[in-house]
Every structure is written in structure tokens, then in C-alpha cells.
């Protein structure tokens, strides 16, 4: 906005700018910047500070510039105008000054009129900062309507901008999940953001660990400074406007016509104009307080007796169903409990489930605890335990798995209890034996509930265990049978879609697998079976499948959705999703970015790791650290990975071990590390983890081990998707030593953003073409290789295909060869090495003989092929 504002102030056909922003959006900060920074407008700035206290005093805001005025100058507005003109011409001879008006809506009528006249006459330029809908006088807004003032609106902070403010405020980086939380809570309002962070630090909800700030719990209450801001924002509201605002803060978003039935239709429009409430972006018929933090501020200012009166008045005014939508039911149930109203148990259980889906776990816990009847007590117990689990609260004393599974009186509650029990056990130690035991228990209880019908629902947990063990084909069979049988409850069907999608994607059928996982996520988003923990479960599998099948753009979009400013599971987004984001960056060759992301993510996972992601993250961090030349850090993470008990899926464990082997190979290639990758590939093949095997085989070939290249070709041929076609062509080219197929493979790999494969394919093709003496094609491949290499911060090694020619050169000859290949002339080489040009010519002749070439252009080909098809990194 700064550049556009500067351009507006410099325009000859306008008199300045009106800058609008909600309270806390930084208007006063911008006013100070305009006063201190002459880059926006080079002339002398003058500040007019309008306040509520001066609003009733004629010329009160202009008093600092009328101190030298005589009594005769204050007779009428024309005399005062002359006095002001004289002041500004004296202070800025020959220049047009800039008058910065902070809180311009608070100007007294006389000052407002005179400032408009000064602007119209061209005596001054104005930059007036104001709130939306707050004008007491129309002089300056009229200039905007006439096109003399340019309008600007202060925009909320992006997540990146909010993160930068957090880092400046705290002196260290805040993990991404916490930044997303504070950005969504504050709505990108800078004042709200700073106050919320300060409050979280004081309440020890935001703490520093391993050099990063982590939000370990949601801050309780509202900062006093924000309460003061809330009180000031409602000071000038009418009774009707205050009723509407309080009602929306207490009930959550509501239909506009429902709120208007309080007799306050003009009040609704006024609050929207002021920016204190806003229309729902997806449904203009619904309005609510925004951002969430402002709603909490207003609720904190409403006494309990007034809350009850408002609720009664609101319900009495609405004769039809009064919820604005499913997303609003939770807040309305909370409002009822606040007012001491007895709520139906069924509504409380449904509200708890809904709160869980929308990541409002405190409300889920509260609503579940309010259930009093014995019939729905088992369902309430499941939801209360789910909320405690997702809030990272202690479960000891609250969790009895046998009781949890024995109490449910219906199959749907039993399914929820069994799935939740499995998730809790996996988060504890990740052992699949417990899952099989839970499946047997579930099957037994289901048989008791529905006698004569053998239970098949427990196969969900058996399939989960199979997937964790890498037995994807067995899982696939169970889930296909389960879904084909029909009659499933929404939760069970959603779980089955996730498990089948994962098993298909892990065995080469990525297109069908991705579609099934997306279908599961769509069902959860539509509240058709699911919860916050199940959503996390589905997201991990969906994003992982996209990454490991090189659908990088789709994976990036899915990750961005979880950093998009919504308030979700901050541990999940800051830990689990951040790890996947780092792996995505690494697979694209962006190791520096991956390194910056994965370190704070590991810090979060040490606090909470419901998806059993920490071992995989440690291994990935080891590889990334090695690629950014941090050998000490790489070895530290590798050692921790090896010392951490196995947790999570067998496939992620094998990939983790491969990452560690790759990390160590980067630092010190050895036969033992090559054997380790061979062993891991063999293990993946023997257990049926084809997707994992494919990645390990790719790593082997890229690091120069071609022993299993034929297996990679066969495996890629059986897989779906563009990545598989690129790998198949790449393996075929390596097997046949065919430069044309390698060139084609490089093109396919580049389309899939598989830059490592694209670079290696080009380098292999270049070497083969050089051996054939095809210089013209070689030069074209060399140009492509250089471009593709630039997409990587560092290529993977391929020592097994390194040419040996350069090793025959002496040290002096090697230096000359490298300088000549990089474009240096004979004279430049001579000057750099303190030799005569004739001596350089002699060295080059001997270099050409040793390398079997005749021209300088061929020398560049040899050096490039040596660097990118054969160096150790």
C-alpha cells in the first residue's frame, strides 16, 4: 500500500488520501510512519491528532497551529483559514505540506471544514486516517466522493506478516501452528495479535522450547487491554446497536432477519458499516462478530443477567428454527448452559460431536460433561475422552478402555469408542498388537449388541493394523468387502475410505487412492461422519500419498489449506503437517526451506505427537541437514532416530531409515551405506510395501547403485500416474545406456517436478553422447542440464557413473581445465595462475590429448558431465 499511497499524494489532480481501518488495524502506527518517513511524501509533515475530548471544541484539533494567531484571527472561519494558510506558507515556503490527521472521524466540525478547504485550495495535502462508518461530519468524505481524495483500506495481516511480527515481538520464531492460531484468532488485526501474544506469554500458554515459541494450550480469558478496547468500541453505540452486537457475540453468527426481529434492522446495517460485525463470506444472509477474539471480548463485557435477558428476547422474537447453521449450534448450546437452561441430552451429545469436528475441544468437553441421562452417558463419555485426548489433557483417571468399550448401547457409539481407543493407544506407543486386541474386543461387543449377525465392523481396526504393518493387500481386501456390504454408519464408512485409499496409494494405485481419501475428507467437511482426530488421520494419509507420488502441486495446496488462517489443531498443523511440508520441499530440492520448517516442527512433535510422526521427522531432518551441509545436526538426528523405539507405520520407519542412509552417504559414501539401502529395498519388497520400495530404489539409482535398476523399471511399470511413467522411462534409459530415452525421461521427470531424476537423466545422457562424439546434441543437453541443475540447491550423488577422465589430469591441469570450461580465456588463465599464455596453450594441448577431445567446447562437456553425473554432491 505504501507505493500506491505515495503515488496518490504526488498526483496533481487529487488532494490526498482517506485511509480506513478497523480499531487496532494500525492507523496510528501508519500516522507515525508518515510523520517520520519522508519517502512517502517528501515535504514537511504536520500531525493533527483528533480526539473525542476535543470534538466539541471549535478548532480544537488545529490548536497547535493557531498558537501564534491573534484574537482578530479567530473572529470567524475565514479569518482562521487565513491564519492557517499563513502558518503553513511560513513553515513550508514554496512547498505543499502534508497534514496527517489521526482519528479524523473525531474532528470537530470547524476543523473538519477548514482542513477540507485547505485541501481543495491546494494549500496542503491530507492523509486522513479513520474508522469505517465513523464520520461525524461530511467535509472530508465529500472530497472522496468528488474524487479529490483517494480511498485506501488497511488490510489484515497475512500469516507470513503475522509470523514476522511474532518473531520481532518475542525475539525468536514461533512455530507455524501457533502463528496460524493467533492469525485466525486476531483476524489479522495487529493490535489484537500483539495483545493476544502478550497475554499468552503471561499466562504461560505460549512457552519457548528449543529456541522456538510453542503454544501448549489455548490462553484463558481476555487481556485487559483488549477489554478496554472493546469498551471504547461500544461507547458510542445506541441501545439497539448494543443489543445486536451482544446477541451476536453470545449466540454466534445468526441470520440477519432473525437479529433484525429484535427491532433493530437499522442497527444491523450500522454495525456492518462500522466493521464491528460482518456478513459471512459464504452466506450474505448471515452476520456475526469478527474476528473470534473480538467476539470473546464482547462476551466478557456482558453481565450474566443481561445475557439471560437477551437470550429470552431473542428466542421470543424468532418463531422458526433459530440456528443459522450447523457451525453455530455449539455456541448457542454454550449460551444456553451459561444462562442455566436445561438442554436435551441428545442435543448436547450432537453439539459435542460438532464441536470436535470444528476443533472446539473445550466446548466439546463442556457439552459432554453436561449430559445427565444414563441412556446417552456412553456416547457422552466417548466425546469427553476425545476432547481430553485432543486437548492433550491427562487421561489417567478418566480412561478405562474396557469400560469404554463395554458401555456403548449402540453400534455407532461402539464404533466411535473403538476407533478412539485405537488412536489413543497408537499415540502412546504405536504397537499394532494392541490394535488387534481392540478389534477382537469390538467384534465381541458388536456380536452381543446384534445377536445372530457376525460383526464385520471390527475389520476397520484390523485393516488399520495391517496398514501400519505394511500389509496393504490384506487391508485392501477387508475394506473392499466392508464398503461393498453397505449399511455402514457414517463414521465407519469414512474410516474405511481412509484405510482403503491408503492401502491403494501405497501399492501403486495412487489415482484411486487419492480419490478415496479426498472423498473421506469431503464427508468430514460436510459433517457426514467424522471428527477432528479422524480429519487429521485422513489429511496425513492424503498429503503423504500426494508427496510420495510426486503430485507436488496438489500436496502444496492441501498443506496450504491447513495454514489458511482457520483455527484448527495447532499441534497438528505446526508439527505433523509442517513435517510433511518440509519433506515436500526436500523432494523438490529446496533443502534450505525444508531445514527451516522441520526444526520447529520437531519441537512441536516433542510436545504432542498423536500421529506418531516424530521418528520419521527425525530421519527426514537428518537427510535435510546433510544436504544443507550441517553434518553435526544430521548425525545428531540420525542417532536419535536409531535410538527412538519404533512408532508409527512400518513404511515410514523404512523410509526414515533410507533418509538416514542418504544423509550419511552425502557426508561419507561407503559400501556399507549402499548395502543398507539394498537391505531396506529388499525388506519393503518382501512385506508388500511397493510404494516404499519404489522410493528406496530411486534413491539407490540416484546415488549410483544400479543393482536393482531392473526392479525399479518393473515396479514403475505397474504403478499409476505421471511419476511412474517418468521413472519407468528413466530406468529403461539407464538399463539400455540409451541417451535418447534418458533425454525423454528427463523431460518427463521435469514435468513431474522430480528434479533429481531430471538432472541425473540429463547428466547420464550427456556422458553417453560425449562418448559417441555427438557434440551438437551434447551442447543442447548441456544447456538443459545447467537449467535443471539450477532448480536444485544440491543434486544427489551418482558416483557409480562418474567418468574417470579428469582423474588423469595433474593438479595444475585440472585447474586450467576448470577455468577454461567456465569460459576464461588463455590470457585470463595465465594471469590467474601466474603463467605465460604460451604455457597455458601447452597445458591445454596435453589436456585435450588425455581427454580425447580437440576443442574447448568439448572440454566444457567433460567438466559438466563429471560435475553432475559423477560428483558426490
Image (tube, grey):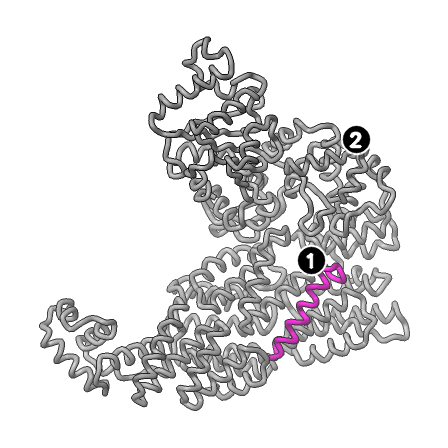
- To which residue does mark 2 refer? 305
Which disc is residue 532 wearing?
1
Whether the magenta-drawn stretch holds residue 528 is answered as: yes
Asked if residue 357 is positioned above or below residue 799 in the image, the reply reads: above
Whether residue 329 sits left or right of residue 866 in the image: it is right
Look at the picture and state if 505 lies above or below 356: below
Q: Position of residue 650 (x, y in %)?
A: 59, 73
Q: Nearer the viewer, residue 366 or 736?
A: 736
What residue is drawn where x is 25% and y is 72%?
A: 822
Residue 614, x across and y down, in percent: 55, 63
Identified at 35% across, 79% down, the residue is 780
Q: Is residue 860 above or below residue 519?
A: below
Badge 1 or badge 2: first in the primary sequence: 2
Looking at the image, which residue sits at the far right?
A: 452
What kind of secondary structure does the magenta stretch mostly adopt?
helix
Is disc 1 surrounded by few (<14), some (14 to 19) or many (20+) residues within 10 Å?
many
User: Residue at (43%, 15%) from the top-left corner?
Assistant: 67
Report the magenta residues as a range: 506-533
> Is residue 734 visible to us here?
yes
Amino acid at each position: 500500500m505504501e507505493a500506491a499511497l505515495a503515488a496518490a499524494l504526488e498526483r496533481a489532480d487529487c488532494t490526498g488520501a482517506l485511509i480506513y481501518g478497523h480499531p487496532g488495524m494500525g492507523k496510528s502506527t501508519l500516522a507515525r510512519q508518515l510523520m517520520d518517513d519522508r519517502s512517502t511524501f517528501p515535504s514537511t509533515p504536520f500531525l493533527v491528532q483528533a480526539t473525542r475530548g476535543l470534538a466539541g471544541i471549535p478548532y480544537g484539533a488545529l490548536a497547535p497551529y493557531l498558537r501564534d494567531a491573534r484574537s482578530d484571527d479567530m473572529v470567524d472561519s475565514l479569518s482562521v483559514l487565513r491564519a492557517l494558510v499563513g502558518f503553513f506558507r511560513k513553515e513550508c515556503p514554496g512547498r505543499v505540506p502534508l497534514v496527517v490527521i489521526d482519528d479524523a472521524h473525531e474532528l470537530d466540525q470547524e476543523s473538519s471544514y477548514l482542513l477540507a478547504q485547505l485541501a481543495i485550495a491546494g494549500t496542503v495535502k491530507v492523509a486522513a486516517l479513520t474508522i469505517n462508518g465513523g464520520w461525524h461530519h461530511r467535509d472530508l468524505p465529500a472530497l472522496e466522493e468528488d474524487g479529490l481524495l483517494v480511498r485506501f483500506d488497511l488490510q489484515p495481516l497475512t500469516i507470513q506478516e503475522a509470523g514476522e511480527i511474532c518473531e520481532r515481538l518475542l525475539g525468536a520464531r514461533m512455530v507455524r501452528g501457533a502463528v496460524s492460531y493467533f492469525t485466525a484468532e486476531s483476524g489479522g488485526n495487529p493490535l489484537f495479535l500483539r495483545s493476544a501474544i502478550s497475554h499468552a506469554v503471561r499466562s504461560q500458554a505460549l512457552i519457548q522450547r528449543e529456541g522456538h515459541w510453542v503454544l501448549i494450550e489455548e490462553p484463558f480469558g481476555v487481556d485487559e487491554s483488549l477489554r478496554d478496547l472493546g469498551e471504547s468500541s461500544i461507547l458510542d453505540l445506541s441501545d439497539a446497536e448494543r443489543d445486536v452486537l451482544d446477541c451476536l457475540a453470545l449466540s454466534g453468527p445468526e441470520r440477519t432477519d432473525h437479529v433484525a426481529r429484535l427491532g433493530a434492522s437499522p442497527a444491523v446495517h450500522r454495525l456492518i458499516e462500522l466493521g464491528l460485525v460482518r456478513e459471512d463470506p459464504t452466506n450474505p444472509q448471515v452476520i456475526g462478530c469478527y474476528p473470534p477474539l473480538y467476539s470473546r471480548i464482547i462476551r466478557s463485557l456482558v453481565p450474566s443477567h443481561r445475557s439471560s435477558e437477551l437470550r429470552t428476547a431473542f428466542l421470543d422474537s424468532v418463531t422458526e428454527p433459530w440456528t443459522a447453521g450447523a457451525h453455530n449450534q455449539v455456541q448457542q448450546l454454550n449460551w444456553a448452559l451459561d444462562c442455566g437452561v436445561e438442554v436435551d441430552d441428545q442435543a448436547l451429545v450432537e453439539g459435542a460431536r460438532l464441536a470436535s469436528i470444528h476443533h472446539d475441544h473445550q466446548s466439546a468437553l463442556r457439552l459432554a460433561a453436561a449430559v445427565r441421562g444414563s441412556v446417552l452417558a456412553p456416547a457422552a463419555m466417548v466425546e469427553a475422552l476425545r476432547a481430553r485426548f485432543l486437548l492433550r489433557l491427562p487421561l489417567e483417571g478418566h480412561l478405562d478402555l474396557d469400560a469404554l468399550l463395554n458401555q456403548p448401547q449402540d453400534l455407532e457409539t461402539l464404533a466411535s469408542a473403538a476407533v478412539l481407543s485405537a488412536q489413543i493407544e497408537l499415540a502412546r506407543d504405536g504397537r499394532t498388537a494392541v490394535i488387534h486386541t481392540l478389534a477382537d474386543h469390538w467384534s465381541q461387543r458388536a456380536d452381543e449388541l446384534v445377536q445372530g449377525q457376525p460383526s464385520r465392523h471390527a475389520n476397520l481396526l484390523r485393516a488399520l493394523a495391517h496398514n501400519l504393518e505394511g500389509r496393504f493387500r490384506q487391508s485392501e481386501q477387508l475394506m473392499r468387502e466392508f464398503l461393498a456390504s453397505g449399511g455402514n454408519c457414517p463414521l465407519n464408512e469414512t474410516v474405511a475410505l481412509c484405510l482403503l485409499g491408503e492401502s491403494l496409494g501405497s501399492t501403486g494405485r495412487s489415482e484411486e487412492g487419492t480419490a478415496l481419501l479426498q472423498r473421506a475428507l469431503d464427508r468430514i467437511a460436510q459433517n457426514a461422519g467424522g471428527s477432528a482426530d479422524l480429519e487429521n488421520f485422513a489429511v496425513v494419509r492424503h498429503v503423504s500419498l500426494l508427496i510420495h507420488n510426486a503430485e507436488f502441486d496438489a500436496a502444496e495446496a492441501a498443506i496450504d489449506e491447513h495454514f489458511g488462517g482457520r483455527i484448527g489443531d495447532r499441534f497438528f498443523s505446526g508439527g505433523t503437517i509442517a513435517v510433511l511440508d518440509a519433506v515436500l520441499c526436500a523432494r523438490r530440492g529446496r533443502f534450505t526451506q525444508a531445514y527451516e520448517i522441520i526444526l520447529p516442527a520437531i519441537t512441536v512433535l516433542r510436545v504432542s505427537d498423536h500421529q506418531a510422526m516424530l521418528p520419521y521427522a527425525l530421519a527426514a531432518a537428518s537427510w535435510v541437514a546433510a544436504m544443507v551441509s550441517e553434518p553435526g545436526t544430521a548425525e545428531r538426528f540420525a542417532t536419535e532416530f536409531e535410538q527412538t523405539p519404533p512408532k508409527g507405520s512400518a513404511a515410514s520407519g523404512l523410509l526414515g531409515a533410507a533418509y538416514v542412509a542418504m544423509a550419511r552417504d552425502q557426508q561419507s559414501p561407503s559400501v556399507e551405506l549402499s548395502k543398507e539401502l539394498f537391505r531396506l529395498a529388499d525388506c519393503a519388497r518382501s512385506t508388500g510395501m511397493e510404494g516404499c520400495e519404489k522410493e528406496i530404489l530411486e534413491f539407490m539409482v540416484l546415488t549410483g547403485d544400479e543393482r536393482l535398476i531392473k526392479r525399479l523399471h518393473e515396479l514403475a511399470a505397474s504403478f499409476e500416474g505421471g511419476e511412474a511413467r517418468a521413472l519407468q522411462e528413466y530406468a529403461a534409459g539407464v538399463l539400455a545406456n540409451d541417451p535418447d530415452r534418458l533425454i525423454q525421461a528427463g523431460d518427463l521427470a521435469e514435468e513431474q517436478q522430480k528434479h533429481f531424476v531430471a538432472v541425473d537423466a540429463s547428466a547420464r545422457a550427456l556422458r553417453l553422447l560425449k562418448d559417441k562424439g555427438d557434440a551438437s546434441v551434447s551442447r543442447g543437453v548441456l544447456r538443459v542440464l545447467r537449467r535443471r541443475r539450477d532448480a536444485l540447491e544440491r543434486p544427489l550423488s551418482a558416483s557409480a557413473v562418474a567418468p574417470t577422465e579428469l582423474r588423469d589430469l595433474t593438479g595444475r591441469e585440472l585447474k586450467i581445465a576448470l577455468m577454461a570450461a567456465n569460459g576464461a580465456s588463455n590470457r585470463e588463465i595465465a594471469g590467474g595462475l601466474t603463467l605465460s599464455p604460451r604455457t597455458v596453450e601447452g597445458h591445454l594441448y596435453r589436456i585435450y590429448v588425455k581427454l580425447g577431445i580437440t576443442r574447448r567446447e568439448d572440454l566444457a562437456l567433460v567438466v559438466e558431465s563429471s560435475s553432475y553425473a559423477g560428483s558426490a554432491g
